[in-house]
Image (cartoon, grey):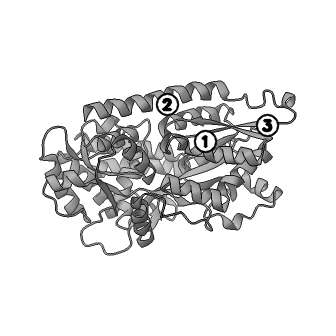
Amino acid sequence: MAVGATRLKRVIGAVTAVATVAFAAACGSSDSGDAASGGNVTLEFAQWWGAELPAGDLDKIVSDFTAQNPNIKIKLLSAPYASTKQQLITGAASKTLPDVVGLDGAWVNDFAKQGAITDMSKLMTDSNYDASQLASQIQVNGKTYMIPVVNFVYPLFVNKDLLAKAGVAKTPTTRSEFLDAAKKISALGGDVKGWALPLDTAVPNGIQNDVMSWLWASGGSMLQDGKPALQTPAVKSTVEYVKSLNDAGVIAPGSLTMKEQDKVEKFTNGQVGMMIDSLAHINLIKKNAPSLKFEVAALPAEDGYTGKRGIPYASWGIGISNSTKHKAEAFKFVSYLMSKDTNAKLSTIANGFPGNKTAQPDFGDSDPLFKTAFDIYQQGYPANEFVGLPKSEDLMRSFDEQLQLVLTGKSSVDDALAKAQQSWSSVIG
């Protein structure tokens, strides 16, 4: 297991280093040589998608576009999510974003208010684009700044071998069953634990994906009429449940500084039995651990809950830099990615759901786990209340800081939620 961990970490680190250098060198340079090349345009496209897809798949989709549009070249800047996020935040602040950018819905409000990404509503109107084919659009003040290209649900990933070895007969469907299974897996000893919880405050999306997901799975909400509602019984129950997992010693060590990629690595190496994670990582897990037997399932709900279960989701969103001189060409590339056939192909190889509602993923060629997740998705509803909120990363971070105080015994649940409520109210108002 240790060899696999080292190998995965080295691959991620190498990709990050290369992409960071490429990103830094490329930003602001896409216009160079355009005039001298007879009107040809080079668009830089920064995203984390290429790092999560099978090698070469995103390049092939881009090559098909450039074959159809020989005057437009696409320069891919690919890096893992955390690295891409940091680079884009820096680029947005300095107005040096690449021409086309992969976006997380959590960043959109801030980027739009900074004037870093462009209003795509106008670009759609100017190009007579049929927006009715889009499954969704992320807007700020009625203007579209992000189009979700592929949508991913975050189901429960379960290591079937560890479950069986621990004597757990079935995948847990309730909170009490999950706690019981996590205890039995942790009792196997060694470096194995039941669950992984990434709470690094530098990249606080663990609050969205790994904490609030327990709330949404039981039909709860962290908002009321668009305002923070963190002192409700539902939110308190969620935090108390996470605390109970921590108190039981079933969470993988290092959670306070763990990032999402660390969580995936631990699951891949058989060090945790269960995690809540994106379907986008199926390819990465199978590449690095082809013999690992795992399945996906709906998130466990509160005992006795019978309603529909919210399932967290995230999108590979796309936006266009407000400073690019090639908005029309950039939107042409966006339109291509959102076209029925291309969007179906991209969502299939990514193990996600199409952003074009007329596109149909090919279940025949996709991983069987994708079909299972699609069934889970259809039986519940997509839930991510952070999308579109102002300073959503800061909201996650302030909640993260309070949760860490709870888990380290420095604060009560009630005090932590009161302080998080106060912090959120100052942002959302």
Q: Residue at x 58, y 56 (%)?
A: 345
Q: Front-most of 237 and 418?
A: 237
Tag 1, which secondary structure? helix
Q: Which image quadrant for residue 266?
A: top left
Residue nearest the viewer, comparing 304 with 273: 273
| Residue of label 2 | 15
Q: Position of residue 316 (x, y in %)?
A: 55, 50
**Residue ID for mark 1:** 59
Q: CA distance from mark 3 to mark 1?
A: 18 Å
**Residues tagged 3 and 1 counted as in contact (Cβ below 8 A):** no
Q: Give the mark nearest the N terminus, 2 or 1.
A: 2
Residue at 70% x, 48% y is 65
Mark with earlier residue (3, 1): 3
Q: Callout 3, which amino acid?
A: Val
Q: Is residue 93 left or right of residue 239?
A: right
Q: Secondary structure beneath disc 3?
A: strand
415 vs 357, nearest the viewer: 357
Q: Earlier in the sequence, mark 3 or mark 2?
A: 2
Query: Cβ–Cβ below 8 Å for labels 3 and 2?
Result: no
> Mark 3 = which residue?
41
Nearest the eye: 86 or 47: 47
Q: Could you tell me the amino acid type at mark 2?
A: Val
